[in-house]
Amino acid sequence: MTTHVLAQTPPPAPSSYREKTLPLTGLRWTTDGRLLVTSDETAASLNRRAFSVSAGQAIAQCQAKWLASQVVPREDDPLQAAPLGVHAHAALESFYRDVPAAERTREALEAHVRQVFLSPEFRADQEKLDPDGRITQELKVMDFALGVLELEDPTKVNVIEVERRFKAVPLNTFLNLNGFIDRVERLVTGESEEVEITDYKTGKYEKFNPAFGNRDEKADQIRIYGRGYEKQTGIRPTRGQLLYTGARARTEVDMSVEATDDSVQWLTDQYQAQQRAVEAREFTTNPGPLCAWCPLVNACPVGQIGSPKKWTNADKFALELSNGVALTEKRRAWMLKDAVSLRKAVAAASGQFSPDQLGIAGSREFKPAPVVPPLVLAALERHEAEEAAATAPAERARIETSPPPAPLIQEIHAMTMTAAPQQAAQQMPAQAPQQQMTPRPEGRPFDEIVNGPGGVPLLNLNSYAATGVFGLVGLAGESLTKAGVAAPTQEQILALARVFARMVQRAEAGITSATSWSSGANTRVRGLLRSVLEQRPLPVGAGPEVWNVWYQTNGPYLMVLAQSAMTVWDDNAISVELLMESLGTAATAQKGGPFA
């Protein structure tokens, strides 16, 4: 193992850090991509008496991005992994702390998750979402928490404590540790006892591959926490594990003294790099695919190179191949299923994949003759042969964007809309036909289909897709009721839901070239549809011609809204020139039209 020598520098002065309340001033970029701190107040806020593992990971990734995380206010989307994980962690914390081992059942865990749903923090996130988003949030948090049941038997977990806190715990002469351990437990192996540290991960799982030359930062975290626990209690944890509750994967961590020393040294190196940057008031940048998630991407002169937020998976994989990086088995399997990635892989193999295709010329050094695994090349040849010989349509049919056929409009008119609201209010809902019900299995929220009796594919009612479909049907019934139909029939609701589904699918395909009831794009478009219905109510009581006008006008209008949302995101910072142009365009809008 390589011996590291710590730089002989004294610990920094006490911090005057205040919780991210500083204004966005006192920063300046250099032309070569360094971020300078010009404000004494901002510089003083960056001193750290203690350091966390996540801070070390951020510094190792990009010093300027870490600086941005300290001075730029941030508000996460409640449906992103981080806030969802916080709520799932809270449920697991109380479950393992408050429930006796013998009583840790699925029902008990579900009850703890529902208790989290009542917390002020969860309710605050719910206020930011539309009704579909709130259902999706609850399903995901429940799924992340219940995933632990597929990775271990909670009744056999001998918990010592949960949420063990480190506050400026000295790991060596130079480094004090901040952080939390999710769970500490006691293991009995033979006649001896061992202590194990467990950390929950609700994000995606990807097996660590040392071929990429990166550190296993998640394992570093567990080992560093183990050293902190040893410093606090005198007991050295000899076991460590990561439970990916969302992905249903478990990873054991090497907790040997040698491996732990290396992890602690790595964090010490990052801490000293951070302190040197603070002392010099100069933070370096390290551009890459994660630049898109940095709050400074619109201002950073280096992060702008390549517009990494526009990279596709095919681009990323071809870029790695161009740099001679071996693909992981997971990425290789993904590439074998994607024709675009395969073509770019062959271009990379033949030296024809240019950095200019990604707009990142000069940002990385490319090898002239990269090597693509033979498996990828063979798969490409097989794919091209099958494509040339195929006479059937592509596996994924192109989404049709033409208006719906006349029979659909006629069906809607005949079944739902010819009666005036006052007459419709007197109707009684038709009785649904009696059907022989059979047990219906449920799967994970990510799985849209489950196998029913006899292997028949069925909609998984626990899936995000089911959330979308049920929400859309509910919106159809709600819209009819608001329009004056007091007791909509099943046929009426179904007819209108089909119209809504067609509108959503067309708009979704317009921005993603695909449709899926479980996708985030579908959820966003359904939210826009609710907005359209608030602006332009259903023409209940009108004839088929009026309904045709309503559909022909509002179907494209929904697509315009979806595409406009993507354009606003692409705009990044709104310049003064664009603002003035936009104000001029807004002034051209006049009252009138069929919905005025």
Image (tube, rainbow, N blue to C red):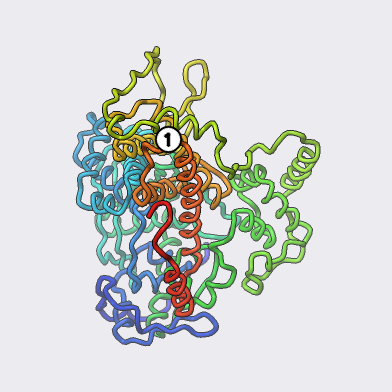
423 or 200, nearer to the observer: 423
Residue ID for mark 1:
497
Q: Which element carries disc 1, helix, strand or loop?
A: helix
Q: Is residue 507 above or below residue 354?
A: above
Q: Can you tell which quarter of the image residue 37 is in?
A: bottom left
Residue 548 screen position, x and y as percent: 49, 41
Residue 558 screen position, x and y as percent: 46, 51
Say left or right for 446 vs 111. Answer: right
Say left or right for 273 vs 42. Answer: right
501 or 331, nearer to the observer: 501
Res 20 visible? yes
539 or 14, nearer to the observer: 539
Name the residue: 31% across, 23% down.
429
Say left or right for 372 vs 313. Answer: right
434 or 282, nearer to the observer: 434
Using a 10 Å C-alpha cutoff, classify the residue at mark 1 as few (fewer than 14 neighbours), some (14 to 19) or many (20 or more).
many
